[in-house]
Image: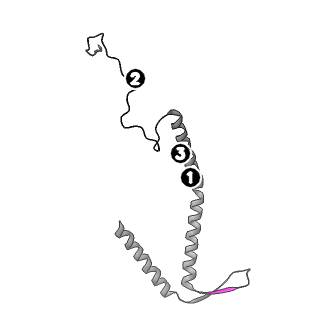
Amino acid sequence: MRYIYWGLTAFVAIVIACFAVSNRTVVDLEFWPLPFAVSLQLYLVVLGALLIGFLVGWLIGWAGGLPARRARRRQARRIAELERELGRPSPANPAPANPAPANPAPANTSTGGKPLVSAG
């Protein structure tokens, strides 16, 4: 898996480098209604726009997941609270390895120690 990751990373880096070398033309960017212009190489403009697009998309996705993360935290707190009320162990407070039985079963003495067999 590591080789696939590094292979794809190298491929993308080579494509970006070829794109940058092929598009070194200087372009003027004017930001209307602002009164100034910036001269940049074309590849910087295109790659900068892609980077800004990725960052905006990531931010929108992160913000869209906020309600789900908030609900998951609320549910985890509620589960821990209910487990404390029931006395059940939670992952933060595990149960002892070999708990002793609370009420051992009484011995059956009416059949002389033999198990009861039901007629079915």
Residue at the spot x=56%, y=80% of the render? 46
Q: Which residue is mark 2?
A: 103
Q: CA distance from mark 2 to mark 1?
A: 43 Å
Q: Which mark is residue 69?
A: 1
Question: Of callouts 3 and 2, which one flags the residue occurring earlier in the amino acid sequence?
Answer: 3
Q: CA distance from mark 3 to mark 2?
A: 32 Å
Disc 1 marks which amino acid? Arg
Residue 96 location, x and y as percent? 40, 37
Mark 3, secondary structure of its residue: helix
Segment colored magenta: 33-39
Disc 3 marks which amino acid? Ala
Mark 2, secondary structure of its residue: loop
**Mark 1 surroundings: few (<14), some (14-19) or many (≥20) residues within 10 A:** few
Q: Choose mark 2 or mark 1, whichever is in front.
A: 2
Question: Residue 63 lies in magenta, yes or no?
Answer: no
Q: CA distance from mark 3 to mark 1?
A: 11 Å
**Mark 2 surroundings: few (<14), some (14-19) or many (≥20) residues within 10 A:** few
Disc 2 marks which amino acid? Asn
Q: Up-down: is 77 above or below 110?
A: below
Q: Up-down: is 4 above or below 46?
A: above
Residue 53 location, x and y as percent? 57, 71
Q: Which residue is mark 3?
A: 76
